[in-house]
Image (cartoon, rainbow, N blue to C red):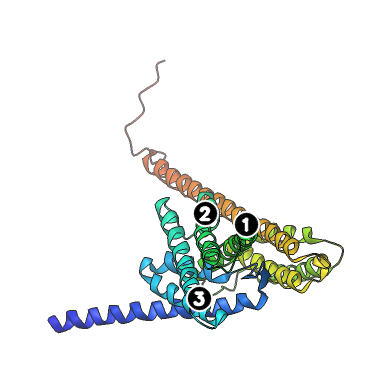
Amino acid sequence: MRRVIRSQETRHRAVAVLRMLGVTAAYYLSGRLGLLRQVGVEGAVVTPLWPPTGISLAALLYLGAGVWPGIALGALLTVVTLGGTLSAAGVGIAAANTLAPVCACAALRAVGFRTELDRLRDGVALVFLGAMGGMLVSATVGTATLMLGGDLGVRQFGQVWSAWWAGDVMGVLMVTPLLLVVRRARLPRADDRWVEASALAVVAVGATIVATRSPLSMLYLLFPVLVWAALRFQLAGSAPCALLMSVMAIVAGTGGVGPFAGHPVLEVMLNLTVLNGCVALTALLLAAIVTEHNNIRRETELACEELAALVEELAPRRDTGGRSDGPADPPRPV
């Protein structure tokens, strides 16, 4: 019996270690992808979209708070890769990047957040508590660490903090909903709306290319596509579209093409932040509203069916001869 218990404990520990290592690998690889479009703001390296924050929060929501060492290790590896050596400032930045998603996850758990994102309150909680609120920790602690270490002046604190916070927030808003959808993914059925889904994908790619590459500033073309995706496919359609639009906008913005051509770095970062924020909010909140409405409709229909069945069961039953199973009707007076 003891051997069985020990083998089970060993198996659980091995699974926990593998989960942490998987989170570490995902954090590091996504960090490398995010650094492909890094931007220098007042001597500090920031990104318009930092995917590791979204991956970290999703991992905590899925696997529990016990995977935080994997996030910390991934953050340390990313800092070492970026700076070449591990300094006190690097340790502080890694600690900030670990603490932020942990605080965000704790705040979401405290308000009863559901990973299905099938209620408007869940979408609002993810936006304001998970993204905007939780990422205050990483931006504040990380920027303060750079300033205390002498790598950043007091006058540059506000600009670096804003860019840092915006990148982390976009990572949560763009990546976390997509991972929440992927967890519930299933094999498509033959009766699924393949034609409409294919048309949506083609239109999304085409509209995004035109909006982010045309010098005519037609970024507003993105929102009708998002509305289509959210109304017809909910989060499964709007989350990938939002991520596609955000990535292509970042590529265009950091490359200085299309509507971002000829603008300074800070202005481009501000425009990307506003655009990505509007795209994320439209995709996430509209999909949550539609999903909640559909669930309420299904529950109402089910309740009506149960009520109809109950009424039919309680109603007097009559046989083919016209006689009732219940008591006979009293005679009418002459």
Give the left or right position of residue 40, taking residue 296 as reference.
right
> In the depicted view, which residue is nearer to us: 151 or 9?
151
**Residue 210 at what x, y percent from top left?**
81, 68
Give the left or right position of residue 129, taking residue 167 as reference.
left
Question: Which residue carries the number 2 mark?
Answer: 133
Q: Earlier in the sequence, mark 1 or mark 2?
A: 2
**Residue 187 at what x, y percent from top left?**
53, 75
- Disc 1/disc 3 C-alpha distance (Å): 27 Å
Residue at 76%, 68% in the rendered image: 208
**Residue 73 at what x, y percent from top left?**
43, 77
> In the depicted view, which residue is nearer to us: 282 or 161?
161
Crowd rating for badge 2 (residues with CA inside 10 Å; few <14, some 14–19, many 20+): some
Q: Quadrant of residue 225?
A: bottom right
Report the amino acid beneath label 3: Tyr
Marks 1, 3: nearer the viewer: 1
Give the left or right position of residue 132, taking residue 268 as reference.
left
Q: Earlier in the sequence, mark 1 or mark 3?
A: 3
Q: Which mark is residue 158?
A: 1
Crowd rating for badge 1 (residues with CA inside 10 Å; few <14, some 14–19, many 20+): few
- Disc 2/disc 3 C-alpha distance (Å): 21 Å
Q: Quadrant of residue 206?
A: bottom right
Give the left or right position of residue 36, taking residue 123 as reference.
right
Secondary element type, mark 3: helix
Question: Which residue carries the number 3 mark?
Answer: 27
Position of the N terminus, as image quadrant, is bottom left
